[in-house]
Image: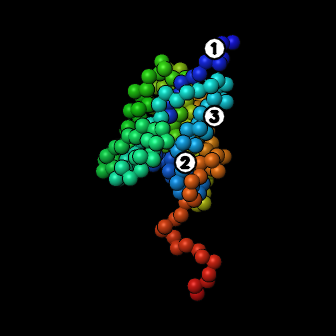
Amino acid sequence: MQDALEPKKIGIIVDSASFHNLMRIIGIGQVNLQKLLEVINREVSEMIQAPVIVAFARYITAAENPNRFKKRVTFAGFDFISTAPDVEDSDDDEVNRQIVLTNQDSLAALIVVTADVLDYAKSLEIKRSQNVQIFIATITADESNGHAPLSMHSRIIMAENQYILIDLEKYKKDLLVTEWVDLARPHVTGMDTN
């Protein structure tokens, strides 16, 4: 009975480009990253039926001028990893590298925050084969144009490999700091300009 109460270590990797696109789809402009950690901790703890402690939380970005938000990310409790924005897929390569380099002996679960499961399928399978439980934190909602950010292929990979879904959309109120504003579209003010 003692083992059931022993905390399990988890690792979290955020694919920031995919994550912020997911948040845009559900109407979030600025997200509360501390709440993201809380949501993941709570969900994983409930699913594995044990308390969890975060061994690491890594936020990977290929954004230009990443220092403009680095302080906010590190304050929330993440290691900030910036890759070369001018090198195609440098952030995906780094996510894969972080997944593979994770010490499986110290982790019960690895959580990847992304909709791009296909980009990480081989790396995730390596971890799963090492008895690390895989969670994918994403959304299942479609965009207004009907496009699904979590592709059917990604859903199949998740089902075949028994990856566990954490649907972030149900935590929108917890994650929301500011709403998404599409600066590319004219704002509706309620006044007819015709």
Q: CA distance from mark 1 to mark 2?
A: 33 Å
Please tell me the numbered disc located at residue 32. Answer: 2
Q: Earlier in the sequence, mark 1 or mark 2?
A: 1
In percent of width and height, residue 51 lies at 62, 25
Asked if one can make out residue 109 in the rendered structure from this viewpoint, the answer is no
Q: Residues within 10 Å of mark 1 (few under 14, many from 20)?
A: few
The quadrant of the rendering that contains the C terminus is bottom right
Q: Residues within 10 Å of mark 2 (few under 14, many from 20)?
A: some
In percent of width and height, residue 46 lies at 67, 30
Q: Specify the amino acid type for callout 1.
A: Asp
In-image side of 147 versus 86 (left or right)? right
Asked if one can make out residue 144 in the rendered structure from this viewpoint, the answer is yes
Q: Which residue is mark 1?
A: 3
Q: Earlier in the sequence, mark 1 or mark 3?
A: 1
In-image side of 181 versus 60 (left or right)? right
The quadrant of the rendering that contains the N terminus is top right
Q: Which residue is mark 3?
A: 42
- Residues tagged 1 and 2 counted as in contact (Cβ below 8 A): no
